[in-house]
Image (spheres, rainbow, N blue to C red):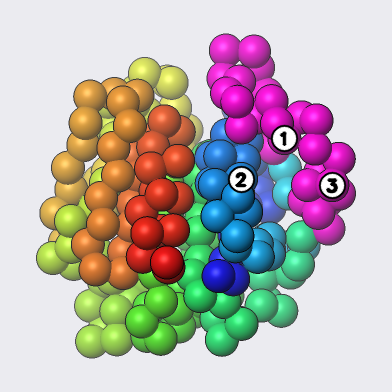
Amino acid sequence: MRVLIVLTSHDTLGNTGHKTGFWIEEFAAPYYALADAGAEVTIASPKGGQPPIDPKSELPDFQTPATKRFNDDETLKHKLAHTAKLNEVVADDYDAVFYPGGHGPLWDLADDPNSIALIEEFYRQNKPVAFVCHAPGVLKKVKAPNGTSIVKGKEVTGFSNTEEEAVQLTKVVPFLVEDVLKQNGGIYSKEKDWHPYAIRDGLLITGQNPASSEEVARILIEILS
């Protein structure tokens, strides 16, 4: 199993003066699930190098066994500091792609032509594509081979409007994940706020929130194995 993980390079939370990036748990939990299952994992980001970690995701309240493992894992930290540039990776080299969330992807990956083309190519090659929390928002402009939105008519989930309201960023983010998935024809569903919830529809796997990241990875591993 060769899996590509794509992280954001965007570190500014709108005009708030606060920092954002990727949510560490949404990277660490799937990374270890995949690596422990024997997958060879490559990490990429639009700018390459060290992707920004959302500082809030490092707070004590959000620590999990996976983030604690990451905190002690100098090898993975070194790997993370040297991510490949997104425009230098190709779908041919991997069996699947996984996008962790955090708010950062809404600003860069959702409009990144390299990311859009990469997801479309994975899908065209009948390879699974997985997204958790805010990451389903990167599907905003991604098309299926028939030219319609990749989510049209598909069962999907992603960070809900009520969860975005709870973190008081509804007016800060460039768009709401739930709204965009629905506008593009996705059959959106959700669990209670902050509860684990992941859906597979064919090659497309989506998870609602940080608590769903391990479940998305589990479904992806199931498909690959």
- Give the image location of residue 107, x and y in percent: 54, 51
Residue 143 position by quadrant: bottom left
The residue tagged with tag 3: helix, strand or loop? helix
- Give the image location of residue 147, x and y in percent: 26, 84
Is the residue 133 above or below the residue 211 in the image? below
Q: Are marks 1 and 2 in contact (CB under 8 Å)?
A: yes
Residue 186 position by quadrant: bottom left
Residue at image point 33% right, 32% down:
196
Q: Which mark is residue 32?
A: 2
Name which residue type carries label 1: Phe
Left or right? Give the position of 69 relative to 26.
right
Residue 168 position by quadrant: top left
Q: Please tell me which of labels 3 and 1 falls first in the chain.
A: 1
Q: Please tell me which of labels 1 and 2 falls first in the chain.
A: 2
Q: Nearer the viewer, residue 53 or 64?
A: 64
Task: Give neighbour class at mark 1: few <14, some 14-19, many 20+ (Cα, 10 Å).
Answer: many
Q: Nearer the viewer, residue 8 or 67?
A: 67
Spatial CA span between label 3 and label 2: 13 Å
Determine if the magenta segment contains residue 63: yes
Residue indicated by mark 1: 70
Look at the image and give the residue range highlighted in magenta.
53-82
Q: Are marks 3 and 1 in contact (CB under 8 Å)?
A: no
